[in-house]
Amino acid sequence: MLVDDIGDVTITNDGATILRMLEVEHPAAKVLVELAELQDREVGDGTTSVVIIAAELLKRANELVRNKIHPTSIISGYRLAMREACKYVEEKLSVKVDRLGKDSLINCAKTSMSSKLITTDGNFFANLVVEAVQAVKTTNSKGEVKYPIKRLFFVLQSINILKAHGKSAKESYLLNGYALNTGRAAQGMPTRVTPARIACLDFNLQKTKMQMGVQVLVSDPRELEKIRERESDITKERIQKVLKAGANVVFTTKGIDDMSLKYFVEAGAIAVRRVRKEDLRHVAKATGATMVTTFADMEGEETFDPSFLGHASEVVEERISDDEIILVKGTKNTSAVSIILRGANDFMLDEIERSLHDALCIVKRTLESNTVVAGGGAVEAALSVYLENLATTLGSREQLAIAEFAESLLIIPKVLAVNAAKDATDLVAQLRAYHNKAQTNADKQHLSSMGLDLTKGVIRNNLEHGVIEPAMSKVKIIQFATEAAITIVRIDDMIKLDKEESGQEE
């Protein structure tokens, strides 16, 4: 539970969220916070793992430096271990999704949610997530299949998550269409428009007022009325231009005043004001509309071209709990879906949203990379045994760093066992024994997927029991954690300017 300086409460176990909300002063700790954010951006899950491994690598590197091992030797050892580990995951531990069937996606989502608050409803939400991701599948010009889920470097997402109070979490559902958390601007407007021609505007549709400082000298009071009328007419002409272009749905990020609403009601169009800019971008992308910031063209004339309009099969207003929402269905360019979350309170809804975000990203990564590995500490234990054996074959100083790297990876199964109130020492020892057999006996290779079963506190084959994660997630965790540790190990001295002293000198 995090309480910030103004008293806002956040209840979460998402590593990236916790670290983002901490006001970290120490420069080395800032590196770890950025590391978690990078993992969140690149993969979407595994933020806690990456920080735990990086911290363990640093702790062991510190021990080595104290024992007079030069940081350069540690760095080259860590680099070598990282390369070998990633190669081993990709070549020996990863399994193609096709071999495991459709359930593998649901299992990936369930594994991602197993540590979250919604783990009891894991089955329900995993199905919801997989359905949502498969609904927004797109194929680009090169024939590559893409799943536009995350706002990754301006690639906009096609899955919108809306939160509504009331009912239980299990009554959340998937809606076909992009949902906007706002209603019609006036009651006289229709609740459904088919087919929809959508205008996306990023400016005011209110009565134009003259700028501050403009003075008008009038000798006849009737002239004043003409000025007022002209102000109203300018907005009326603008609205007529949009309606003449064929628009029957208008979304704007700014306001629409009551005078202007009258024209939309008369034309039988839906107008929606104060739409979030991000939502408007998503709608524009999905329907093929252009976001218009001004009516002025190159010559300074005010025009609105019909090509600016987006197309959807229908736009409809629906009611969810106490709120109205606008649904854009059957979008032209990319299909869009919305997940409507139900829950008891804001804390619960926010945490479910974060958990779903992680699960959505994991399913997307699984579909795009098409390879998975066993979860529950299986990969870390296998790598630990492999790297330890590798270290003994080297005759250089890097041997020590690689051996420490191998030990560091065991922190993941240890933490998992401790969190499940099981005997970590015993379980990790058994786990290593299994993986040692898998790597030394050719006929025991099936044991390479052995991981922890935290409910019963035993070792089992996690690949068969559906505890799986995308292979790409594990590779990124190892790469990012190693790079972050190396960045800090490289540092010899820290020079800090004291604020008070610098003030006196000035």
Image (tube, rainbow, N blue to C red):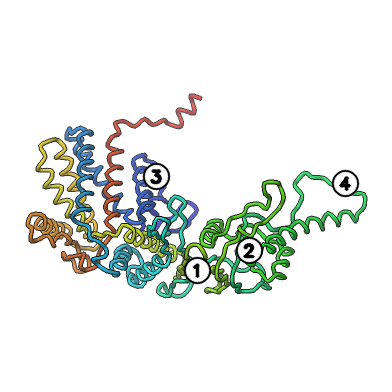
At 29% from the left and 70% from the top, the residue drawn is 103
Q: Earlier in the sequence, mark 2 or mark 3?
A: 3
The residue that label 4 is drawn on is 217
Q: Earlier in the sequence, mark 3 or mark 1?
A: 3
Q: From this viewpoint, which residue is outermost toward the right?
A: 220
Q: Amino acid at mark 2?
A: Val
The residue that label 2 is drawn on is 250
Vertical side of 177 occupied by 433: above or below? above
Q: Please identify the quadrant where the N terminus is shown.
A: bottom left
Image coords of residue 268 (percent x, y): 68, 71
The residue that label 1 is drawn on is 177
Q: Is residue 47 left or right of residue 334?
A: left
Q: Earlier in the sequence, mark 1 or mark 2?
A: 1
In this orientation, does residue 12 appear? no
Q: Residues within 10 Å of mark 4 (few under 14, many from 20)?
A: few
Q: Nearer the viewer, mark 2 or mark 4?
A: 2
At 36% from the left and 71% from the top, the residue drawn is 127
In contact (CB < 8 Å): disc 2 and disc 3? no
Query: What is the CA distance from the residue labelled 3 to the residue labelled 1?
Result: 41 Å
Q: Amino acid at mark 4?
A: Leu
The residue that label 3 is drawn on is 24
Q: Residues within 10 Å of mark 3 (few under 14, many from 20)?
A: some
Vertical side of 362 occupied by 317: above or below? below
Q: Residues within 10 Å of mark 2 (few under 14, many from 20)?
A: many
